[in-house]
Amino acid sequence: KQEVTQIPAALSVPEGENLVLNCSFTDSAIYNLQWFRQDPGKGLTSLLLIQSSQREQTSGRLNASLDKSSGRSTLYIAASQPGDSATYLCAALNSGNTPLVFGKGTRLSVIA
Amino acid sequence: EAGVTQFPSHSVIEKGQTVTLRCDPISGHDNLYWYRRVMGKEIKFLLHFVKESKQDESGMPNNRFLAERTGGTYSTLKVQPAELEDSGVYFCASSQDRWARTGELFFGEGSRLTVL
């Protein structure tokens, strides 16, 4: 059974800092791994999706990496801004017809 | 194009009452999913519809929860009778292909349920 863990649970950084959010998963037989963003009272927005055959994906100031062998993914945010403040969720999709499994998320606060 | 819409955004009911949550997926999306987030816990899968059929309902907590998707369009999730531990945010998502393997998974803003 897939389990996804995110560390840290909360993070507060000053504006402009580069930061890394961590995600680990127990079952390496994943089909893909996704990073989502959730703003308070809002739904989840997909940020980056990494297929199992890929090592990383980039979108603007965001870069997500995937290391299947070690069961880890990281989300790197460059030059953080107050608008980046949100909860970031990592979710793993395994092969077969099993559901997408989420971590608890990391609540990020970027202080101006 | 409208996204995934959920109604109500917030519902407050007393223990023992019934609540029905509704989800309208993106038009044309055959796959519809219900998830729930209880405070302090991760977002957990409840069930998956493909058109009007339940593909996977392994995450449904118990028989007080009933999900339907008549006609393969919108879906409802009924909780009857509601218990305190049912409080949380219920998310709906939809995708064109199963589990959005080749596309994107779109989430609604959630329905917050508070059971007093």
Image (cartoon, coloured by chain):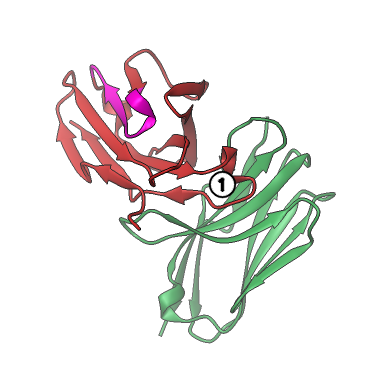
Chain colours: A green, B red
> What residue span does the magenta drawing correspond to?
B68-81
Q: How many discs appear?
A: 1
Residue that appears at 65% across and 59% down: A22
* Residue at which label 1 appears: A103
Which of the pair B56/A80 is nearer the observer? Answer: B56
The structure residue drawn at horizontal position 68% and vertical position 62%, both measured from the top left corner, is A74
Chain identity of mark 1: A
Q: Quadrant of residue B20?
A: top left
Q: Is residue A106 left or right of residue A29?
A: left
Compared across the picture, whether A28 is left or right of B106 comes to right
Judged from this view, the residue extending furthest toward the top is B63
Q: Is residue B78 visible?
A: yes
In this rendering, the answer to whether A47 lies above or below B97 is: below
Q: Is residue B54 magenta?
A: no
Residue at the image point whose x is 14% and y is 26% from the top:
B14
Image quadrant in which the N terminus of chain A is located? top right
Q: Measuring 39% from the left and 47% from the top, which residue is drawn there?
A: B26
| Residue A105 place in picture, x, y as percent | 52, 53
Give how far across and how far down residue B71 sits, in percent.
35, 26
Find residue A98 and report its image quarter. Answer: top right
Spot occupied by residue B85 in the image (x, y as percentages of width and height): 32, 27
